[in-house]
Image: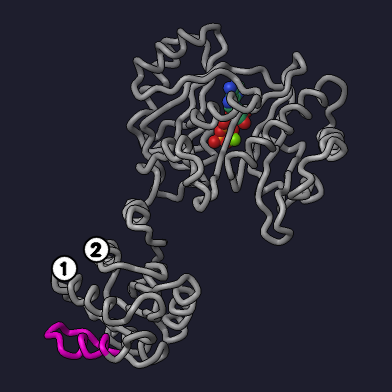
Amino acid sequence: MNIHEYQAKELFEKFGVPSPKGIVASTAEEAGAAAKTIGGSDLVVKAQVHAGGRGKGTFKNGFKGGVHLSDTPEKIQELAGQMLGQVLVTHQTGEEGRLVSKVMVAEGVDIERELYLAILMDRGTARPVIVASTEGGMDIEEVAEKTPEKILRQFIHPLNGLQPFEIRKLAAALKLSGDQAKQFGKLLKNLFTLFIKCDCDMVEINPLVVTPAGDVLALDAKFGFDDNALYRHPEIVEMRDTTEEDPREVEASKFDLNYIGLDGNIACLVNGAGLAMATMDIIKHCGGEPANFLDVGGGATKEQVSAAFKIILSDPNVEGILVNIFGGIMQCDIIAEGILAAAAELELTIPLVVRLEGTNVAKGKELIANSDLAVISADNLNDAAEKIVAAVKG
Ligand code: ADP
Ligand code: MG
């Protein structure tokens, strides 16, 4: 799960990570009022979407830039008016872009240096890793490609946590000394606490800036949370903005289904992530293209199977469905009932291949064979993949 920059600021404030004051607005007038509240003549207005690269992005109406500096509330109001309700395209949004329905007005900050700071979970070492670079404010992927020596990684021991010597090492690498190094140390310590306490899988500050006055501040924020730990953080779940997510994935998550949309035309409905991966592979092996990854989980109910079918069928690219279920906790006859009920209710017109194996498989197959729906039964994974690929091509 991701959150917006203005929401990230709330977490920054709570954990003591310094960042400029910001106020969210949904209309140009609200943005103007927010600018007056913030005051001064250094103001910035920023499009709020779950994607980076806003500064260099372009709106579909031709307006350039999702981040603008200005000196009066009137100008901020006008700029907000140009962004709100428009679609912003950045290198992270894909060409379809993202609709901007909120902007954040913030204090503009004088910048002396832009740095990069992130904390991620590293799968390889199973530890948090702090990534830092003097090359902030730019596309970090590009820095990593062209000048990898400018990116520093500090792996953190999961039990010992962040150590003072590690902070000093990072500060030195970022060419921070004296009071700046002290401020950085405090900020990083608090950011690390936030990362662990909130079960983040990513926090990225690009840029972390040093001001001419010598202060160290977070100017941007991108957060990712571990979905499996969200139950511990109702206040973070509250921040979820489902309009930023694929509607099919939002619908799937309501029913505890793991769904990821893909580009092909053969939909898969499978129980278990490993089986789902194998099913997608074998579809490809047989010359087809999977339309999605859909794992209904080990103990899928009839309601979940029905919801899964609805989500699959809402994709206009889907020309056939392959159901591959291994009955363990879940019994094949229950699944068969669910499939038949959903197929009948949704008046399925595209080919449906079903492969069942495991507990009560004979009963499940019998139900399918005896139904008057045109369901193609398969005996094994390979047979199932060949049948659905042939049915879709035919
Ligand atoms: P994105 O990464 O999506 O482009 P940022 O928040 O990083 O968005 O903003 C882009 C650039 O705009 C920053 O690198 C920084 O130079 C400038 N900027 C952002 N916020 C402020 C601010 N509060 N004051 C001054 N400049 C800012
Ligand atoms: Mg940025």
Please tell me whether residue 214 is drawn above or below residue 248 in the rendered image: above
Residue 310, which numbered label? 2
Q: Nearer the viewer, residue 336 or 277?
A: 336
* Range of magenta residues: 363-377
Residue 231, which numbered label? none
Which callout, 2 or 1, points at the residue further toward the start of the chain? Answer: 2
Res. 348 image quadrant:
bottom left
Is 370 contained in the magenta span? Answer: yes
Q: Which residue is mark 1?
A: 346
In screen coordinates, is 250 left or right of 46?
left
For numbered disc 2, what is the local secondary structure? helix
In screen coordinates, is 195 left or right of 86?
right
Report the amino acid beneath label 2. Answer: Lys
In screen coordinates, is 112 left or right of 379?
right
How far across and how far down the image is residue 310, in percent? 24, 63
Say which residue appears at 55% left-offset and 27% top-offset.
9
Please tell me whether residue 311 is drawn above or below residue 147 in the rendered image: below
For numbered disc 1, what is the local secondary structure? loop
How far separated are the C-alphas under marks 2 and 1?
8 Å
In screen coordinates, is 390 left or right of 25?
left
Please tell me whether residue 176 is drawn above or below residue 364 in the rendered image: above
| Number of other residues with Cα within 10 Å of mark 1, as a class: few under 14, some 14 to 19, many 20 or more | few
- The image quadrant where one finds the C terminus is bottom left
